Amino acid sequence: MTAALPDLLNNVPPQVVQSIRAFRIPDLQAAAQAGGQHFLYANFADIETKAEALELIGREFHLPAHFGKNFDALYDCLTDPLARACRQPGFVVVLDQLPVAPKFDKDVREQLLDCFRDAAEFWAEQNVPFRCFYSYL
């Protein structure tokens, strides 16, 4: 028997960056919506570089025009301005098909995921759920 969608997120720590594993993206989206949380999704299937990845995130997450397209700027956009805007209900983030490419190597992938781990820690201090799921291409 499959768990009800809102329960899907209740079984995941409120602050986590983890492989998507057995979760299905539509289920995560439905659970985020049922829980009144923001759902952020980016598909990296056609991305080969760090710059392209940051451009994609900026576009898909609707980051402000002044987004500096580096990891520090990404962290800043994922945290402080949102916290100052209003009380946030929580976030479910999906980074789908992260590339394995010469210009997007293991170090770049880990830096990107570290940025989301840091954001999860920030939101933990605010007592706001921040769950990030990723997969590799």
Image (cartoon, helix red, strand yellow):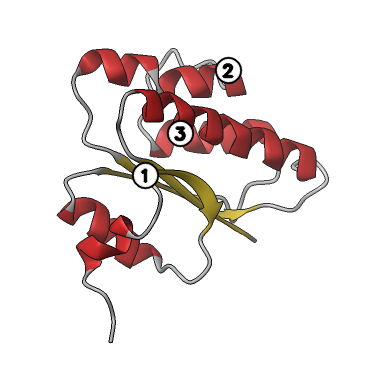
Inter-mark Cα distance, 1 to 2 = 23 Å
Comparing labels 3 and 2, the label whose residue is closer to the camera: 3
What residue would you read off at disc 1?
A: 14
Residue carrying label 3: 120
Q: Which mark, by number, is residue 40?
A: none
> What's the amino acid at mark 3?
Ala
- Against 92, residue 77 (above or below) is above
Which element is circle 3 on? helix
Upstream in sequence: badge 3 or badge 2: 2
Q: For mark 2, what is the residue?
A: 72
Could you tell me residue 65's position as x and y percent?
40, 17
Which residue corresponds to the image point at 33% horizontal and 39% vertical from the top-left? 129
Instruction: Give the residue at the far right of this rendering.
Output: 102
- Could you say whether the residue bearing mark 1 is in a helix, strand or loop? loop
Helix, strand or loop status at disc 2: helix
* Residue 95 can be seen in this image: no
Residue type at numbered disc 2 = Asp
